[in-house]
Amino acid sequence: MSYRTALSEVLTSAVGPVAEATAVQGRFPRGAVTALGRAGLLGLTVSTGFGGGGGGLPEAVDVVARTVRVCPATAAVLQSHYTAVAVIEAYGGPWTRGEIAAGRHLASLALAESEGEPEAGGDGPAAETQLLVPRSVATRSGEVVALRARKQRVVAAGEADLYVWSSRPLAAPDGLTLWAVPAHAPDLFVPARPGAAGPRGSATSTVFADPVRVPAEAMLGADGGGLDIVLRTVLPWLLELRAAAETRRPPALDLGSVRRPAGSLAAS
């Protein structure tokens, strides 16, 4: 079965039926994400050697563009997931790549930081520039690294299985360093989700680490080499996927301008 056929089936059977509840109630589309994983769509861009679909950015763009017509929140989750997977595919370990290929791992980006950034949910060049200058600190003790940070605009916060995380380098004089941080790691904290951040239902929020401890081998790429990864991989994928979502997104409904029929219940 082609990925397009699989996507059509999932959009009809799993994404569409929960799209209204996702948008109105702000409920994370867990069932839709699970169905995408089972259909091989979360692993679409993982190499076939690990059981993935072997696709690339064009296929990811197609999936996001078609999904956003049905559910913007699910499309936002896929944007962050596919971008994070592009990094993991190049620098992550075989077990993680196999889990993503099997549809058991949802990945997300934890790169933006709150201090000195645009208001939550803001996009554009200023927001993207902030991804290049992390303020968070990484400290190594033996084979364990402690990461302290307050990451902003994390999609699927508290719902993803893995975050691609940025910090200042451990020892390199400049640049930044990327890490694969499992969501179950102790001392990761997700507060109440701000309703203004990201599409409703995308679980876009802040993630705190004070600190979170990961193995030193969780580093993605070289110490200080994350800047090149962000410039060459993260931003190209993120911007292409965002453009795909924006060009296909249905117009937002202004609930304040909708007149309720006579006799209808008033909103509480």
Image (cartoon, rainbow, N blue to C red):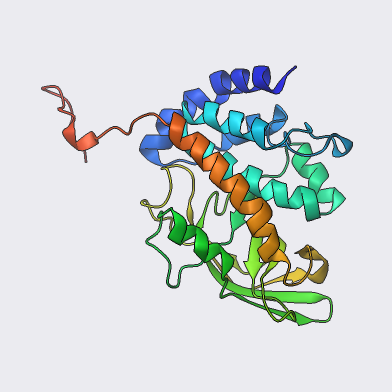
For this view, does 260 lie left or right of residue 99?
left
- The quadrant in which residue 3 appears is top right
Which residue is located at x 56 percent, y 25 percent?
A: 14
Q: Is residue 182 visible?
A: no
Residue 68 or residue 223, whichever sits in front: 223
Which x, y percent locates residue 233?
67, 51
Which residue is located at x 10 percent, y 22 percent?
A: 262
Which x, y percent locates residue 150?
53, 69
Which residue is located at x 36 percent, y 52 percent?
A: 196
For this view, does 132 lie left or right of residue 89?
left
Q: Is residue 209 visible?
A: yes
Q: Residue furthest left?
A: 262
Image quadrant where one finds the N terminus: top right
Which x, y percent locates residue 51?
84, 35
* Image: 94 above or below 229: above
* Image: 176 above or below 44: below
* Image: 181 above or below 85: below
For this view, does 10 lie left or right of residue 140?
left
